[in-house]
Amino acid sequence: MNIRVGFGFDVHRLVEGRDLWMGGIKIDHALGLLGHSDADVLIHAICDALLGAANMRDIGYHFPDTSADTLDIDSKILLRKTVALIATKGYIVGNIDATICAEHPKMNPHIPTMKTCLAETIGTDEDNISIKATTTERLGFTGREEGISAYATVLIAKTS
Ligand SMILES: Nc1ccn([C@@H]2O[C@H](COP(=O)(O)O)[C@@H](O)[C@H]2O)c(=O)n1
Ligand SMILES: C[C@@]1(CO)OP(=O)(O)OP(=O)(O)OC[C@H]1O
């Protein structure tokens, strides 16, 4: 079996007047992430990791932030399209391990729902999706609550 690893990283700025989308779900919070899309930073990191694993460039290459087609788009659509892109090279998602860096809100209560949502979106078992969260101990831009970042590592596999 041909397996490959990929890594993704993304950052979005926290602002007033936007919804906070994370891992495909809307989380109740005073601030939301700014972006051309819904700015779901976790999904964007996962898309980049999948594309990197398949050596297929990155999310902005396939879904430009200059396009009207991606304005305010639900990032679950981008994730579904990314899974379809790697499938053109014969790859399926093996497993995903991701970390969200956010001072607030607490992600832990939402992680089971995010896992269910992402597993459905990708078409894989929930056990293949690990999501973790950490503060940065009030240090840096995430610690000052100016933004949220996310990291993702993935394994993809070609079964034939
Ligand atoms: N936005 C966050 C950040 C952290 N968590 C959970 O709290 C634990 C402790 O965080 P530290 O940054 O102090 O290590 C962490 O391991 C997570 O379980 C969270 O849910 N949401
Ligand atoms: C997702 C896209 C496309 O809507 O835009 P943003 O929501 O701004 O997100 P980013 O992580 O900067 O990169 C990729 C983009 O092209």
Image (cartoon, rainbow, N blue to C red):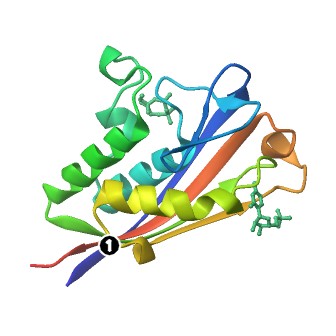
Q: Quarter of the image containing the N terminus?
A: bottom left
In-front residue for pair 7/133: 133
Is residue 96 in view from this perspective?
yes
Total numbered labels: 1
Q: Which residue is mark 1?
A: 4
Residue 58 locus on image (x, y percent) = 37, 43
- Give the quarter of the figure containing the C terminus: bottom left
Q: Residue at x 76, y 54 (%)?
A: 106
Question: How busy is the neighbourhood of tag 1: few (under 14 within 10 Å), some, or many (20 plus)?
Answer: some
Q: Amino acid at mark 1?
A: Arg
Kindly tell me whether mark 1's CB lies below 8 Å from ligand 2: no
Q: Position of residue 31 (x, y in %)?
A: 73, 30
Q: Secondary structure at mark 1?
A: strand
Residue at the spot x=36%, y=24% of the render?
70
The residue located at (69%, 62%) in the rendering is 108
Percent across and percent down for residue 142 are 78, 44
Q: Report which quarter residue 140 is drawn in.
A: top right
Q: Can residue 58 be seen from the camera position used here?
A: no
Most distant residue in the right direction: 138
Residue at left offset 34%, top offset 40%: 78
- Report the side of 42 relative to 60 (left or right): right
Tell me: residue 27, above or below residue 32.
below
User: Quarter-wise, where is residue 10 in the image?
Assistant: top right
Residue placed most toward the observer, 104 or 82: 104
